[in-house]
Amino acid sequence: CTANVTNNLSNRNKVINGSMLCSQRGSSFTATADQTYTVDRFSHVVRGTFAGTYTHSTDSPHGFKNSLKVVPTSTYTPTASDNAIISHKIEGQDLQDLAFGTSSAKKITVSFYAKTGSTNSGDQFSFQLRVYTSADGSTTKIQTRSFTATSSWQRFTFSFIGDTAQTIFNTNALGIDCMWHLAAGASDIQAAITSWTTSGSFTAVTGQSNFLDNTSNEFYLTGVQLEVDQTGSGVATDFEHRSFGQELALCQRYFFKFDVFGGNTKNFVAAYGNSYGQIDVHFPVTMRTSPSGSLEDISGVQEFRGGSWNNRTLAVRNTSTDFMQLESQGSDALAQYVRASSGTPKCSCNAEL
C-alpha cells in the first residue's frame, strides 16, 4: 500500500500561540506605546494614538480555551496615516517552504476566529499581510482583505497568491507580519490590494470602521493560522492545536520570564569574582537572538559576606541565546550567597522580532 501525501498533518501552522494559550507577561495589559507585546507573540502597533486594554480572555469559540481581547481605553478619530493594529510576526527562515521568488511559489492561506462586542457588532476591519523582501527589512510587499465581525464567533479565511518574483530572506529576521487593522486614517485606507504590491504603508481597506470611537467596543481574536497552501485550493485546514508545553517552548524563543531565585526567598548560591557576585541562568530553549534583560522587584536583594547580609543592586551582566549572567554589584570574594529579603525578583528576557 502506498500513499501520496500532499499536506503535512503537523507543523502546518506558522503562527505561534495562535490559540492564545500562553501569556507569560500577565493576564491584562494597558498598551499605549508602539510594539507593546501582550499575549505571547501578539503586539500592539500604533501610529498616532491607540490606547487599549488587552486581556487574556476565556471567551472563545468551541474547541478553544482562550482568546485575545482588546478594548479602547480612550476615544480617538484617526487622521492621515494613523493606525491601530494587532500584529503577529514570523521569522523568515520559517517561511522557506513557500518557495517565494521561484516558479514554484506557493499560495498562503490565513484563517482566524474573530468577534466583537454588542456595541460594535457589524464593524468592518482589515487584515494585511506584509512580506519583508530586503535583508534589512526596509522593503515590503503587501496584500489586504476586509472582514465584517459580529458579536458571534466566525472563522475568516483569506488566500494569497505566491510571489514568483521576490524571495523571503532565510534568516532569523522578520519575514512576514500579520496585521489586524482596528482603525486607520484616511491616507491609509484604499481598495483591497489583491496582488503583491511594493509598499511601506500600513494599509486598511475601504469601509474600515473606527474601533476607537467608543470605549465600550470590543474585539476578540483566536485560532490564528497561516499555512502553505499545498493544494492551491485556498481552503483552510482545521486549526492545528498544539499542547501547552509545545506552545510555551515556541513562545520562549522570543520571550522568557523567570523568578531569579526560583521561588526560594532565603538564599541562592552564586559564583563570585573579586568585584561582583554572579548568578548563572540557562534558558529553557535557545532564544532567537541574544535577549535584552530587564529586572523587577529587586529592591530587597542582599548578599551575605563578612558574617552579615548587605543590600546590593542586581543587574544583567552578559547574555547569549542560551545563557545569562546576573550580577550582584559591589560584592567581593568573601561573598557566598544572595537572597531576596523581600519581594520576588524577576527577570524578563526579550528577543522579539
Image (cartoon, rainbow, N blue to C red):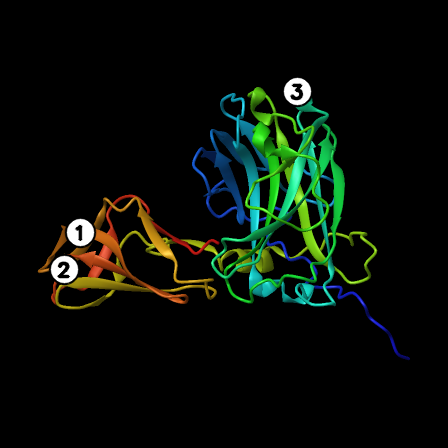
Q: Residues within 10 Å of mark 3 (few under 14, many from 20)?
A: some
Q: Which residue is mark 3?
A: 119
Q: Which residue is mark 1?
A: 312
Q: Is residue 23 left or right of residue 219?
A: left
User: Can residue 65 be seen here?
Assistant: no
Report the residue at 85% width, 73% height from top.
4
User: Can residue 248 be seen here?
Assistant: yes
Report the residue at 56% width, 67% height from top.
170
Q: Residues within 10 Å of mark 1 (few under 14, many from 20)?
A: many
Disc 3 element: helix
Q: Which residue is mark 2?
A: 331
Is the C-beta separation of discs 1 and 3 under 8 Å?
no
Q: Is residue 294 left or right of residue 222?
A: left
Report the residue at 68% width, 38% height from top.
60
Q: Is residue 167 above or below residue 312?
A: below
Viewer-nearest residue: 297 or 177: 177
Viewer-nearest residue: 118 or 196: 196
Is the C-beta separation of discs 1 and 2 under 8 Å?
yes
Disc 2 element: loop
